[in-house]
Amino acid sequence: MTNNNEEMSSVVSTVPKDQTIAVILPLYGFFRDLTSPELNLEVLKSVLSRLRSYNNKVYFLFPSEPPRLPDDIKNYLLGQQLGGNAVGVEVDPFSTYSDYVNEGIAFALEETDSRFLIVVNPWVAIRPGSIDTMVSLLNRPDVAVCSGTDLRKMNIPDQEADTYVFNPPRDFTGLDINFFGLTRPVAESVKIDTQYKTVSFLSRDLYENLSRMGFPSMLTQHIPFYSFPVTWKDLEDPGDFQEDHDLFLQKWRFEPLINPDDR
């Protein structure tokens, strides 16, 4: 893995400035010292095979801690980088998920000219064409941030992950941190609060921050996806949830009603 700026510049130079998408895949949890059935090479390959755009140039950023990556994941990512449209973004040892997302977005803004930034957790199954649909929606003046709808959270069986159709699909106000996109101006304006150590409170804090700044967040059924059942309780320290709860209350002054068992 490398985050060499000169190498990245050579990649970006081949991409039209007005047609680029930076897809950020935070490899949080892909650790050699942690075994999880949902976080392995086969899952990562499956996720990447679905991340395609038919209308735009896409390249991939992989925030990770190289010393902690399993050898098979590390070797696979090295191969991806040789393809010329992927680069590693190294984060500090034992960083939190919020650090991974923050470093990925910061790198995309500093080292690329991408018009759109899309964050995809590497354990979600995206349908073909979803990237282009999200970009199309982000081009609307009333959409600053766009999220897909997680079919698993709606109790849709995994056998219907690629076939289930909402009739009719609806749009809501909301944010799903598993799969969301934002325009470059929004990404430049909104800061990820890296004080949060848990995904649940990071997600809610980001939504509240976007709302406070007047950036409309749309959660749409036009972009369904299916997430693997990653158990955040196994990836986060037990005391972090309460610490983040107290931080959120101090910052926003209301109870977010986040159930620790729903992670």
Image (tube, rainbow, N blue to C red):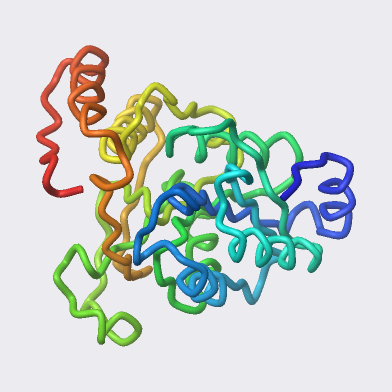
Q: Position of residue 152 (x, y in %)?
A: 22, 68
Q: Residue at x 56, y 57 (%)?
A: 70
Q: Which residue is farthest front?
A: 33
Q: Position of residue 256 (x, y in %)?
A: 14, 31
Q: Position of residue 23 (x, y in %)?
A: 59, 55
Residue 91, by quadrant, is top right
Indicate left or right for 137 with 117 as reference: left
Count of numbered circles on the image: 0
Indicate left or right for 165 with 181 as reference: left
Indicate left or right for 17 with 249 as reference: right
As displayed, is residue 237 above or below residue 23? above
Q: Position of residue 200 (x, y in %)?
A: 26, 39
Q: Residue at x 36, y 65 (%)?
A: 38
Q: Residue at x 68, y 67 (%)?
A: 56
Q: Nearer the viewer, residue 8 or 113?
A: 8
Q: Which residue is farthest top?
A: 250
Q: Nearer the viewer, residue 189 or 159?
A: 159
Q: Residue at x 56, y 70 (%)?
A: 48
Residue 73, by quadrant, is bottom right
As displayed, is residue 115 above or below residue 248? below
Residue 159, by quadrant, is bottom left
